[in-house]
Image: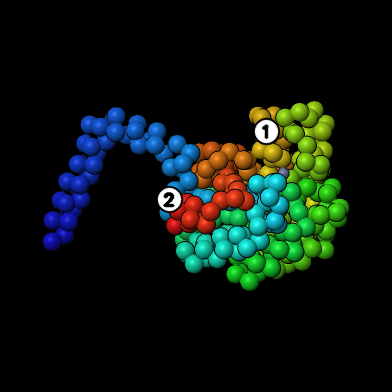
Amino acid sequence: MHIMHIFLLLISMLISGWEQEANPLLQSQIEKKQSAPETQLISRLDTESIPILMYHSISINQSNTLSVPPKVFYKQMEHLKNAGYNTITFKELMSWKTSQRLPDKPILITFDDGYLDNYTVAYPILKKLQMKATIFATSDFIGSPNHLNWNQAQEMEQSGLIEIGVHTRHHVDLTKSNQLQLEDEILGAKQRLEKGLGHPIIAFAYPSGEFNQNVIQVVKRAGFEFAVTTKPGYAEKKQGYLTLHRIRIPGDQSMATFIRKFP
Ligand SMILES: [Zn+2]
């Protein structure tokens, strides 16, 4: 019986090996298909590719498709929960980097800019559903109108559900900044947030998704473990930990589309 198993295994290995060699065209077709944006958004359950969702404001603002209405956001989170997704923080994503086990169906929820409604609207929803998320705050906007203040950021972090990431000091286009500004916007923001929150911060988001090799080098030198872009698709290791892709959730997206993307 045992020998029979090994024999069958060998046969199947031979066949699959032969198929790959005999069909180079098919293989390239598969690769092509995988890199197409639409197919890339269809859920893959292996942890080599992880969805990182990108939100901004959770509010009703029809002139801005970046704003997701609160009811829609609630339904999306409820769906993810019911579909068995496990929200993780970037801190937990360190296990991915070191190839340790992650929870099943891992997913990251992120918010850019640090809007006040992340605290007043999104946080109560996440708390109710016990889901985790990361807020990329623009350090010098903390405490300004329509943005989070320090107490709110601290309170959310203390719940264990929210992680704060860095989104520069002033939300500048980093590709148009000189070296001094780069250091100030990236390292300066990290230091301000770390001082205000009292612990190291490991994740960074490029404002408007703008970056180049020089910008990446500064992010690396600042000591970030992860940085996210606005390039569409699942995050994959081959993208590089400092240039991970994200999936933008438009405010006008139907629930059916959301469910199809995250079954
Ligand atoms: Zn932003």
With 120 as the anchor, is 51 left or right in this view?
left
Q: Residue furthest bottom?
A: 128
x 78%, y 37%: residue: 172
Residue 132 occupies quadrant? bottom right
Q: Earlier in the sequence, mark 2 or mark 1?
A: 2
x 43%, y 42%: residue: 39
Instruction: Name the residue tied to disc 2.
Output: 44
> Where in the figure is residue 201, as x and y percent of width and height?
72, 52
Q: CA distance from mark 2 to mark 1?
A: 27 Å
- Name the residue type under label 1: Phe
Residue 158 or 120: which is nearer the viewer? 120
Q: In the rendered image, is residue 96 in sight?
A: no
Q: Is mark 1 within 8 Å of ligand 1?
A: no
Say which element carries label 1. loop
Q: Is residue 122 above or below residue 112?
A: below
Q: Residue furthest front?
A: 62
Q: Is residue 135 above or below residue 205?
A: below
Mark 1 surroundings within 10 Å by alpha-carbon count, few (fewer than 14), some (14 through 19), many (20 or more): some
x 23%, y 37%: residue: 19
> Where in the figure is residue 164, as x and y percent of width and height?
72, 55
> Where in the figure is residue 258, as x and y percent of width and height?
51, 54
Count of numbered circles on the image: 2
Q: Residue furthest right?
A: 144
Q: Is residue 150 above or below residue 30?
A: below
With 1 as the anchor, is 256 left or right in this view?
right
With 195 as the anchor, is 113 left or right in this view?
left
In the picture, which quadrant includes the N terminus? bottom left
Instruction: Name the residue tied to disc 1.
Output: 211
> Where in the figure is residue 3, as x and y percent of width and height?
14, 56
In the picture, which quadrant includes the C terminus? bottom left
